Image (spheres, coloured by chain):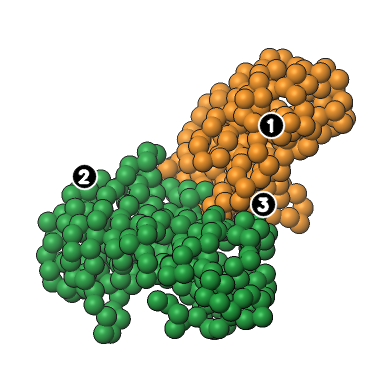
Chain colours: A orange, B green
Amino acid sequence: MAAAREPAPDRSLFDDAPEGRARLKLVVAYDGSDFHGFASQPDVRTVEGVLVKALEKLLRHEVALSCAGRTDAGVHAWGQVVSLEADPGVDPWRLRDSLNAILGPEVVVRECEMVEAGFDARHSAASRAYRYTVVNRPEPDPFLARYAWWVPQPLALAPMRMAADPFIGEHDFSAFCRRVDGKGRTRTVTSSRWIDLGDGVLRYDVTATAFCWQMVRSMVGTLVDVGRGLLRPGDITAILRSGDRQAAGQVAPPHGLCLWEVAY
Amino acid sequence: MAAAREPAPDRSLFDDAPEGRARLKLVVAYDGSDFHGFASQPDVRTVEGVLVKALEKLLRHEVALSCAGRTDAGVHAWGQVVSLEADPGVDPWRLRDSLNAILGPEVVVRECEMVEAGFDARHSAASRAYRYTVVNRPEPDPFLARYAWWVPQPLALAPMRMAADPFIGEHDFSAFCRRVDGKGRTRTVTSSRWIDLGDGVLRYDVTATAFCWQMVRSMVGTLVDVGRGLLRPGDITAILRSGDRQAAGQVAPPHGLCLWEVAY
C-alpha cells in the first residue's frame, strides 16, 4: 500500500517477478540529541538521512523508507520501526551488522528481518508507545541530562497520576497538538500512566493507535503543571473538550521523549 | 592535615581566629566524557579546573581542593568528594545552587556542607566504591554508549563471578596497576562482585580502602577476558601473586568506570 511512496529500485540487482521482491523491517534505536529529527530535510542532519545513505551504500540501489513515528528534533527512539523494499538476496543479519558498523552507537539497528510484501512500518502499525522521563530533584543529573527533563520544583505525583487518566479513550486532541491544517486530531489512547522509578526519576508511559504532532510533549507539559499545582487534575477533561491549545499547559522539551515500541 | 596543600585564603574575607575558618565538603557527580580527568593539568580541560574556577569566582579567594579519587580521562563520578577551606559565612546551600547554575548538568554538586576543620576528602576517606558497566549484546546501545563498555562477544557470567572473589582481601596489586615509582601497591579490597541488571547489562561493583592507578580498569579487563574464555577463574590468584602486569588481561576502557561513593 506504500508503493506510491517508493521510487523504483535498481531492477538489475534482482529478479523482476513478484516473488523476487522483498520487504525489510528494521527496529532502530537512536540518540536524537544531535539530529534534526527523523524525517529527511534538505541541508540538515536527520536520522532518516543517515539511514538512507548507509542503506544505499550497502544495498546499491535507491531506498525509500516508511517509518512508524516521525520523531521531532532531539527526540530519541528505542523501538522506531522502518520498512523498505530490498533485494531478496540480502542477508538481514549481515545488513544489520554492516549498518551498525557504519552508524553505531548513535544509531543502532536492533533487529532486521524479511517481512511480507504488504508490510509498511507506518500504515501497518497498530499502536505506538512513548516514554517520557522527568528528573525531579533540586539539582540536575549529569547522566540523565540528555535523556530526561530536569524539573527542580517539587512535583506531587498523586495528582499527576489522576490527571493522566482522562487521556485514556478516544478524544479530539486538538488542545494537545500543534496544528496541521486539514488533518483530523481524534486519537485513541489505550494506556496513560506515571511510573515512579525512585530517586526522583518519574516516567510517563503512553500508548495510542497514533499521535498528533507534539501531542505527548504537550500532554507531559500539562501533567507537570498539574504536579506543580498550576492546574488541577479535573482541568484535563475541560481542556480536552475545549479543543483550545492555549488552555493546555507548556510543551515539555524534546530530549525527555523516547519512541519506545511499535506494535503490529 | 592537608594544610600544607592549601594556599592562604584571602584573610580579608573572614575572621582570622581559628574558629573563623571553615571546611567545606562537596559531593560531586560528573560526566567525564569531555574532561581530561579530574586533576588539574596545564592547557587541558579538567573537572578540578572548572570546579576551582567556579569556586574562586563565587568565594572570591584562592581555592585548593583535596579529592577522594583522581579519576582518569573519560572516567565518570556520581560520588566524588572534594574538600576546601572557605569563609565560615558561606551558605552551603546557596553555594551548591550557584555552582550548579555555572557547571550543571555536566558537573553537579549533589551535596555541600560545612565539616570539621580536620576533614580532608582524600586523607579522611575510609573506602572508595567504583562501578564498572559492561553492555554485552551483539549490537551497541545508543543510550549507554557514553557510560558502558560494549563487549559484543558472549560473556559467561558464572566464571566472571568466580574470578571476582580472589580480589577480596589485602594483596599486592602490582599486576593490576600502572606503575608509579616508589609507591606501595598493597591495597585491601572489601567487596568485588558482578550484578546482572538484565538485557545484557552487567555491572562490576568493587570497594577498597584505596586503589592504585588504573587498578579497577585492569581488574575489569581481566575479568572480561575470563568471561570470554581467554583466562580461567583460577588464573586470578596466580596473576596477583606474579606481580607481573603482563600476566593480567587488557585494561578496560575508561568510559565504563564511575567513582560511585566514598565512605568516611
Image quadrant where residue B97 sits: bottom right
Query: Can residue A189 be seen here?
Result: no
Estimate the x, y position of residue B253 in percent, counting from the top left. Answer: 39, 64
Q: Position of residue A54 (x, y in %)?
A: 57, 52
Question: Which residue was labeled with disc 1?
Answer: A227
Q: Is residue B31 above or below residue B244?
A: above
Q: Along the horizontal axis of the image, is B224 left or right of B18? A: left
Q: Chain of mark 3?
A: A
Query: Horizontal and vertical percent for residue A124?
Result: 61, 24
For the point 18% across and 49% down, the residue is: B162
Badge 3: how crowded within 10 Å, few (<14), some, or many (20+)? many
C-alpha gap between disc 2 and disc 1: 45 Å
Up/down of B203 relative to A257, above or below: below
- Percent x, y of residue B262: 39, 59
Please name the residue shown 24% across and 74% down the image. Answer: B185
The answer to whether dots 2 and 1 both sit on one chain is no
Q: Can you identify the residue that label 3 sits on?
A: A35
**Viewer-nearest of discs 2 and 1:** 1
- Near-viewer residue (A263 or B107): B107
Of the 4 image quadrants, the one containing the N terminus of chain A is top right
What residue is shown with label 2?
B158
Residue A155 relative to residue B121: left or right:
right
Quadrant of the image containing the C terminus of chain A: top right
Q: Residue at x 81, y 29 (%)?
A: A248
Q: Residue furthest top?
A: A169
